[in-house]
């Protein structure tokens, strides 16, 4: 496994109920490790679907361990009945996807999530 360094925090933006941080991943030893720009975001969702990101090469999504309910991932039509379920503390890595946006919805108000978008 190669070690990677994380560059300086580029910025923090509060957008809706999400906090966004951007990092650049570079190889520490000068090898041909693919270079990604990473955006780290935290947010809170309820029973209305929210778009997470556009055009990520891959995305890592995690439901907070403190959640009392679940979060669900999917396209713009995601619901608790037809979404990819993440229990509190669960996470998923989406390596490649074909829809334009990833949406998240909660089983109840106040469900927290975080994701990393790799570009």
Image (cartoon, helix red, strand yellow):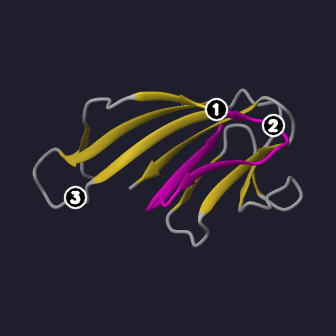
Residue 89: say if magenta: no
Q: CA distance from mark 2 to mark 1?
A: 13 Å
Mark 3 or mark 2: which comes first in sequence?
A: 3
Q: Quick one: SS at disc 3?
A: loop
Which of the marked residues, 1 or 3, is nearer the chain's N terminus? 1
> Callout 2: helix, strand or loop?
loop
Q: Give how far apart the Cα atoms at labels 3 and 2 are.
A: 38 Å
Q: Position of residue 17 (x, y in %)?
A: 65, 30
Is residue 66 or residue 41 the one in the foreground?
41
Q: Is residue 41 left or right of residue 113?
A: left
Q: Which residue is mark 3?
A: 33
Q: Residues within 10 Å of mark 2 (few under 14, many from 20)?
A: some
Q: Which mark is residue 46?
A: 2
Please report the residue visible at 33 percent of the width from the left and 49 percent of the height from the top. Answer: 37
Q: Which residue is mark 1?
A: 16
Residue 12 coordinates in the image, percent (x, y): 43, 27
Q: Residue at x 22, y 58 (%)?
A: 33
10 Å crowding of disc 1: few (<14), some (14-19), many (20+): few
Mark with earlier residue (2, 1):
1
């Amino acid at each position: 496994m190669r070690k990677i360094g994380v560059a300086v925090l580029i910025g923090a933006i509060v957008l809706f109920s999400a906090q966004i941080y951007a990092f650049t991943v570079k190889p520490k030893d000068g090898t041909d490790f693919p270079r990604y720009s990473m955006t780290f975001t935290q947010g809170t969702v309820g029973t209305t679907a929210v778009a997470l990101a556009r055009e990520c090469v891959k995305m890592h999504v995690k439901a907070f361990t403190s959640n009392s309910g679940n979060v669900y991932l999917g396209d713009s039509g995601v619901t608790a009945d037809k979404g990819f379920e993440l229990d509190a503390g669960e996470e998923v890595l989406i390596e490649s996807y074909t829809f334009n946006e990833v949406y998240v919805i909660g089983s109840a108000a106040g469900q927290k999530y975080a994701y990393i978008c790799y570009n």
